[in-house]
Image (cartoon, rainbow, N blue to C red):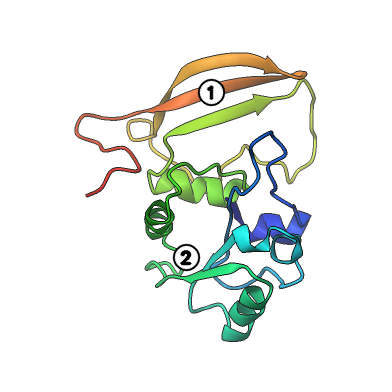
Amino acid sequence: MVGAGTVCADDPSLRCRMPGGAGRWRVVVDARGRVGAGARVCTDEAASDTVLATTPACSRARRRAWASQGARVWTFRPAADGRLPLRALLRRLARAGIMHVLCEGGGELAGALIRAELVDEYRFFYAPAVMGDARAVSGVRGCDFELARMPRFTVAETRLVGGDVMVHARRVRRAGEKAACSRG
């Protein structure tokens, strides 16, 4: 899953290159219809494995253009803030048999997922490099939690992946808190 900003900036293929990865769905969160119908996720041979999740703020013409390329277009009633309701999207994916979602989007989508308490685990990758770009972000935006309320994670695993360090962290639930994929 990625946001519209990632597709607009990078035009990624989002295809899984691992053995057995064919047929994995690609999900693009685009409440306003920013992704053009010429984007790779709409035009390659896996377009039918692409879900473009949007709201009525996206023009009908754009939705039709996505669908004409073979992509699945799912329209949701917007949340109060005008954004796509991520919990509703995940429920619809679950009804379609998709029970695990990898968010590889930018800071905006990552922040929205964590604020909505929809993240069960993270895989942080640390490269032995220094980046001095003023636009560099820490991974999530809009997550200014107070110390007592910030989401907590526990380290499940650390290992080298190529030349990088990967930290696998799982969400620590507070008493009575349900997992993101629980019904209720």
Badge 1 is on which residue?
168
Q: In the figure, 181 relative to 128: above or below?
A: below
Where residue 55 appears, x then y in whole percent?
Answer: 48, 73
Q: Which mark is residue 83?
A: 2
The x, y position of residue 174, in whole percent, is: 26, 30
Give the image location of residue 162, x and y in percent: 76, 19
As measured in the structure, the alpha-carbon distance from the residue carrying label 1 to the one carrying label 2 is 29 Å
Q: Which mark is residue 27?
A: none
How many badges with numbers are in the image? 2
Q: Position of residue 54 (x, y in %)?
A: 52, 69
Report whether 52 appears left or right of 82. Answer: right
Mark 2: amino acid: Arg
* Mark 1, secondary structure of its residue: strand
Residue occupying image coordinates x 56% and y 67%: 72
Secondary structure under tag 2 reads: loop
The image quadrant that residue 40 belongs to is: bottom right
Q: Residue furthest left?
A: 176
Three-letter residue code for mark 1:
His
Crowd class of label 2 (few under 14; some 14 to 19; many from 20; radius 10 Å):
some
Crowd band around label 1 with a 10 angstrom C-alpha radius: few (<14), some (14–19), many (20+)? some
Viewer-nearest of labels 1 and 2?
1
Residue at image location 79% in from the left, 27% down from the top:
130
Q: Residue at 53% x, 23% y: name it.
A: 168
Taking the view exactly as shown, the residue that stands out farthest to the bottom is 61
Question: Image height check: is 155 above or below 130?
Answer: above
